[in-house]
Amino acid sequence: MQGSKMILCGHCGNRAIVHLRAEGTKNGEVPDYSGKYDGQTIIYWRILECASCGEPTLEQTRVEYYIESNTPFLAEVVPESYGQTTLLYPRDKPPLTNLPKTIEKRYIDTLGSKDVSPSAFAVLAGKTLEAVCNYPRVAQRDNSKQATLRKSVDKRGESL
């Protein structure tokens, strides 16, 4: 990989450009283009820096090389496949499960705004809490606590 590419950052949750900061191979291996070995496998590691949050990401790619030849004198070593690129760090965060669709959508929107604008994050977090409080199962449990919570949130909103 040269330069930059766009990924979903595991730290900030933004779809952001990452810049290559370091690259190496497991055990310092390099492709053998002499044609002596067929089926050489090399594991590449790359450290990428997120342009949004500045945090590092470590990815691994497994590349298999083989000899492609019509005659022994014209042998050429080429990568067979670039395989699956795997993110080693940060590990995927387990998603929240069993959320109602309306709450899940608001929650995901809220997380996506946290590094973009603190004000937008606060507003969306409030809307997510409102969706939770208005969800039928929650609304049926205890209307007096819900009313108290709404008054408290309303008072804080007015003071801003």
Image (tube, helix red, strand yellow):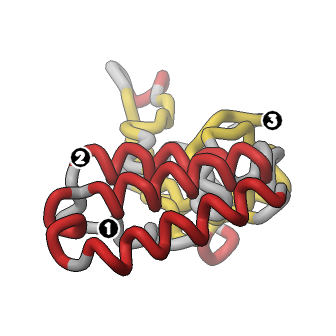
Q: Amino acid at mark 1?
A: Leu
- Residue at the image point whose x is 78% and y is 48% from the top: 119
Which image quadrant for residue 17? top right
138 displayed left or right of 66 = left
Front tag of 3 and 2: 2
Find residue 117 and report its horizontal and vertical position in percent: 79, 45
Specify few, some or many for label 1: CA neighbours under 10 Å numbering under 14, 14-19, or 20 or more: few
Say which mark, if any, is on residue 3: 3
Between the residue at mark 3 and the residue at mark 2, the CA separation in whole angstroms equals 38 Å
Specify the quadrant that holds the C terminus. Answer: bottom right
Report which residue position mark 2 lands on. 101
10 displayed left or right of 120 = left
Can residue 113 be spotted in the picture? Answer: yes
Say which mark, if any, is on residue 46: none
- For label 1, the SS is loop
Find residue 15 and report its horizontal and vertical position in percent: 61, 39
Front tag of 1 and 2: 2
Between 152 and 15, the one nearer to me in the picture: 152
Q: Earlier in the sequence, mark 1 or mark 2?
A: 1
Report which residue position mark 1 lands on. 96
- Residue at the image point whose x is 71% and y is 56% from the top: 157
Q: Amino acid at mark 2?
A: Lys
- For label 2, the SS is helix
Find residue 37 and report its horizontal and vertical position in percent: 44, 54
Q: Amino acid at mark 3?
A: Gly
Between 59 and 107, the one nearer to me in the picture: 107
Between the residue at mark 1 and the residue at mark 2, the CA separation in whole angstroms equals 12 Å
- For label 3, the SS is loop
Q: Earlier in the sequence, mark 1 or mark 3?
A: 3
